[in-house]
């Protein structure tokens, strides 16, 4: 965890001096995610998207955070946006998992209503 914290400090310093450096925001988001700091990861990913709305890696990162939090609707949206920008992204498998989970929970809800 020591090197991860050090990386967070480094990327925090970079974005403090170069706030328009989108990839530094994205890397900062990745480090927050690695530390289990979901809200901070989303916030940094959104900053990356502010500097570059086509940053598909930031969208993939948001999708991963939302997927881990079982927020499948938000994860699906982020993964789909990522795939629109980069159809070769590795997030398609994660998107499938989220969509299947939502379909299962939706069918369970339908069977309870009957």
Image (spheres, rainbow, N blue to C red):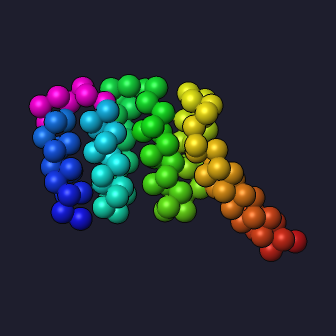
Q: Is residue 114 above or below residue 42?
A: below
Residue at horizontal 69 percent and vertical 51 percent from the top: 96
Residue 70's image quarter?
A: bottom right
Q: Return the x and y of residue 48 as percentages of the image width and height.
A: 34, 34
1 shown above or below 30: below
Q: In which quarter of the image is the N terminus?
A: bottom left
Quadrant in which residue 91 is drawn:
top right
Instruction: Farthest residue to the right: give it.
Output: 114
Q: Which residue is drawn at 45% across and 37% down?
A: 57
Task: Judge from the rendering whether residue 57 lies leftward or rightward of residue 113; answer left or right.
Answer: left
Q: Does the magenta stretch include residue 27?
A: no
Quarter occupied by residue 28: top left
Left or right of 78? Residue 100 is right
Task: Kindly give the residue lying farthest to the bottom in the view shown.
Answer: 112
Could you tell me if residue 94 is visible in this image? yes
Q: Where is residue 112 in the image (x, y as percent from the top left)?
A: 80, 74
Q: Where is residue 21 in the image (x, y as percent from the top left)?
A: 25, 28
> Measuring 65% from the left and 50% from the top, which residue is drawn there?
93
Say which residue appears at 38% left-offset and 25% top-offset.
Answer: 52
Comparing 82 with 7, the one in front is: 7
* Total marks placed: 0
Position of the C terminus, as image quadrant, is: bottom right
Relative to 35, 68 lies left or right: right
Residue 44 visible in the picture: no
Magenta range is: 16-22
Residue 68, image x and y in percent?
50, 61
Describe residue 94's horizontal placement relative to residue 35 as left or right: right
């Amino acid at each position: 965890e020591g090197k991860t914290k050090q990386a967070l400090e480094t990327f925090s310093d970079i974005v403090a001096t170069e706030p328009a450096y989108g990839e530094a925001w994205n890397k900062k988001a990745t480090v927050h995610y690695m530390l289990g700091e979901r809200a901070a990861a989303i916030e940094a990913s959104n900053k990356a998207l502010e500097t570059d709305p086509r940053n598909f890696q930031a969208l993939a990162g948001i999708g991963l955070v939302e997927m881990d939090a079982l927020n499948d609707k938000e994860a699906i949206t982020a993964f789909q946006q990522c795939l629109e920008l980069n159809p070769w992204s590795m997030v398609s498998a994660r998107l499938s998992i989220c969509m299947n989970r939502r379909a299962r929970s939706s069918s369970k809800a339908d069977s309870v209503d009957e």
